[in-house]
Image (cartoon, grey):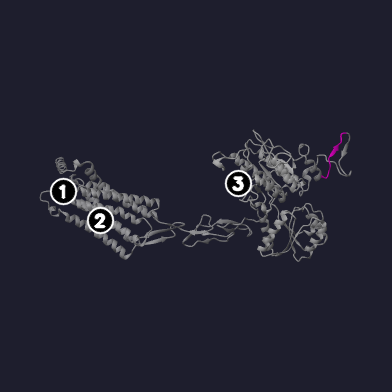
Amino acid sequence: MEVFHGLCNHIGAQRLLIVVSFHVFDYLFALSFTFAIEEINRDLKLLPNTTLGFHIFDSCYSKERALLGILSYLTGKQDLVPNYSCDSVSLLPGIIGDTPSSSSLIMATVLGLYRYPQVSYGSSVSLLSDKLKYPSFIRTVPNDAFQAVGIAQLLIHFGWTWVGILVSDNDYGILGGQTLQTEIFKAGGCTAFFEMVPKDKEKFLYVVNVIKQSSANVVVVYSTGEYLVPFLEAISLQNVTGKVWISSTGWRIFTEISSMRTVRMLNGSVGFFIHRGKIPGLTEFLYSIHPFPSPNDIFIREFWERVFGCQWLKSDGNHTLINSITDKVLPCTGHEDLRTLSISVYDAYNFTYMLSIYNAVYVVAHSLHNMLSCRNGEGPFQNGQCGSIHDFQPWKLLHYVKNVNFKNTGGEYMYSDANGDPPARQVPHSVCTESCHPGYQKVSRRGQPLCCFDCLVCSKGEITNQTDAVSCTKCTEDFWSNDKRDKCIPKIIEYLSYEDPIGASLFFCSSTLSVLTGSILCIFIKFKDTPTVKANNRKLSYFLLAALALCFLCSLLFIGRPMKLNCMFRQVVFGLTFSFCVSCILAKTVTVVIAFNATRPGSRLRIWVGSRVSTSIVIFGSLVQMTICFTWLYISTPFPEFNKTLEDGKIIIECNESSVFAFWTMLGFLGLLAIVSFVVAFLARNLPGSFNEAEYITFSMLIFVSVWLSFIPAYLSTRGKYMAAVEIFAILASSAGMLSCIFLPKCYIIILRPELNTRGYLVGKRDSQKYIKQ
């Protein structure tokens, strides 16, 4: 039955179909549907430049009429010709309904063939979750399976293991009752009887006797309400007492029961109901309806008569008549006030299916919104295409209907699972404070009852893995709490590895510099007979270059997982190689001083000219450092250590140097050698430059001392892998300083300026310097 025209935009019109049956409550459901449509059309963001409309078809709770409506909808005419449409406008984008599951099953079977979206607000039978049979069916009420599980849990919770089951003779009752019976068996209960609610009064007595004679004191009624009221009246007349009645969501009879005897019989019953939530503005909308401003609403006058017990005056053209059976019925004036009605008749918050109807309309609206918001090239269909409202194809809208996810105006999230079922809402509750989730602990509020508390997050390293925990549990030493504080996870193992960006960078630098040092050594060996190489003791230069290459390579002992051997020898190797390097530099400096002072007439230093002094210096410096290092190894050997308290959530593997005194003694002696070399080189800087390396050595020792003085505070202020990284950087920087200051200038002359690498040039330069001094 058409009430309003369709989904209009600037090009054409489309419509939305809802299948309902007229009843006072069903009319109010239709009004809530209208309210949702008008609310959506006022929302400029949801469907901009588009107006949503609808058709209403009255199925009268009949499967045949529901099928008739679907075929009429698909063909666009009253003469039903399947697979043929003569409608000049686009088909409706979706169907909302029907209330009975039996009608919805037939509708879903036909609509599934064409992949037309069907959003049901009342059909909860579990069969409809089968997406192979009903691929285009979506609903906004939970699957009956949830209700069956809930009832079974309720029965077992109270220890009711011996129960009877009454079901209605339809898909809702039979399938739901069978699922309930299965769940009761799983939970350890049994059923005393499984009977159908009779349609004929002749069969009432048989079922009533079964209930009356059964020893089961709990009866679960899994039934719709068509025949339930007279049956319950019959039970109350037979004086059936002492039974606890459990009702399903299909039992909508409380406002229809008139017999106080029946009300007394049902006193203490427990019922399951469809989730009811607040719909802002709906109550005000329902109170605002009126017959006079709504001439197109063909139901409102009948509704007015039903709720106010009056009748409208009608005219036959000549006389004014009262359309009533008795003169005692008052005429309807239109001045009746809806706010005077009983709250049980006009309570929008407690209407069954009111919220599910409202959500069903918004499911279609949000699906259309998502389709309209899609950009070509980014769509879900072939070649990134999107659905179009101008060339409408319902199977494309079905994709958006299945994946809809939104928050309604009441603040509740609406979505469906892979079977098209929404989440089941849980039981209403009344608490002072919501339960503390895992990861939190309960802390009582001062001066308030125990039910009122605060939920405080557990400290780092502590967890709770249960709801409403009184205290947090500390993780063991090798574990740490995750971000949610509900699980202990293994601590992260950390050390300076080759996979670490810092470790990889230092490895690359170390390898590159060692190769560069080896290349310079090869150059010096190749040009060993040139004056530049022969000056200042070429053997010491060879030893120094080899030692510098080892210095660069010894830094690799600090990268990788600390083990017993590399922890034992890394500082020792570092100390010995650097002591050898600095001893060679000191020997070269002393050699320069002796060589130039021995040329003076009558100098006693001539007896020291040669390799004996330089060799002695190198051996002495190396032996002292060797003594320190091996004493350190003998007395207090370094070892790998698992530091579990240094940093939260990490186990840092590091080398414990064992003896801090030995470590700083080794560095102290190394520093002493460097300072002596610096002082000697500084004093010898003014000797003739042709053979003099003193200036370069001065700069190299200045860099060396500066780097290691900076190393001390940096090393003391870091921990873990960064401590090793600081020492590696100091090793590489100081070694690179010595290499660049002492040898790169000579390589420049050897390779790029060979004309300067002659004895004549060097002697001439020496004589000119003497002349300048005179």
Residue type at mark 2: give it: Phe
Between tags 1 and 2, which lies in front? 2
Q: Secondary structure at mark 1?
A: helix
Count neighbours of disc 1 (C-alpha within 10 A) and say few if under 14, some if 14 to 19, many if 20 or more. some
Q: CA distance from mark 1 to mark 2?
A: 24 Å
Say whether marks 1 and 3 touch (CB < 8 Å): no
Looking at the picture, does residue 13 appear above or below residue 138?
above
Q: Say which residue label 3 marks.
A: 403
Residue type at mark 3: give it: Asn
Q: Could you tell me what secondary structure mostly forms the magenta stretch?
A: loop
Q: Quadrant of the C terminus?
A: top left
Q: Secondary structure at mark 2?
A: helix
* Residue farthest to the top, as pictured: 10
Tell whether 639 sits left or right of 699: right
Badge count: 3
Q: Which residues are magenta?
A: 308-317
Could you say where residue 581 lies in the image, as x and y percent from the top left? 25, 54
Which of the two labelled residues, at mark 1 and mark 3, occupies the earlier sequence position? 3
Q: Say which residue label 2 marks.
A: 580
Q: CA distance from mark 1 to mark 3?
A: 91 Å
Task: Report the residue at 25% width, 51% height from top.
Answer: 545
Within the image, what quadrant is residue 9 found in? top right
Which of the two labelled residues, at mark 1 and mark 2, occupies the earlier sequence position? 2
Between tags 3 and 2, which lies in front? 3
| Residue 446 in view of the camera | yes
* Residue farthest to the left, as pictured: 602
| Residue 346 in view of the camera | no
Tell whether 731 sits left or right of 411: left
Q: Say which residue label 1 marks.
A: 596
Q: Quadrant of the N terminus?
A: top right
Q: Secondary structure at mark 3?
A: loop
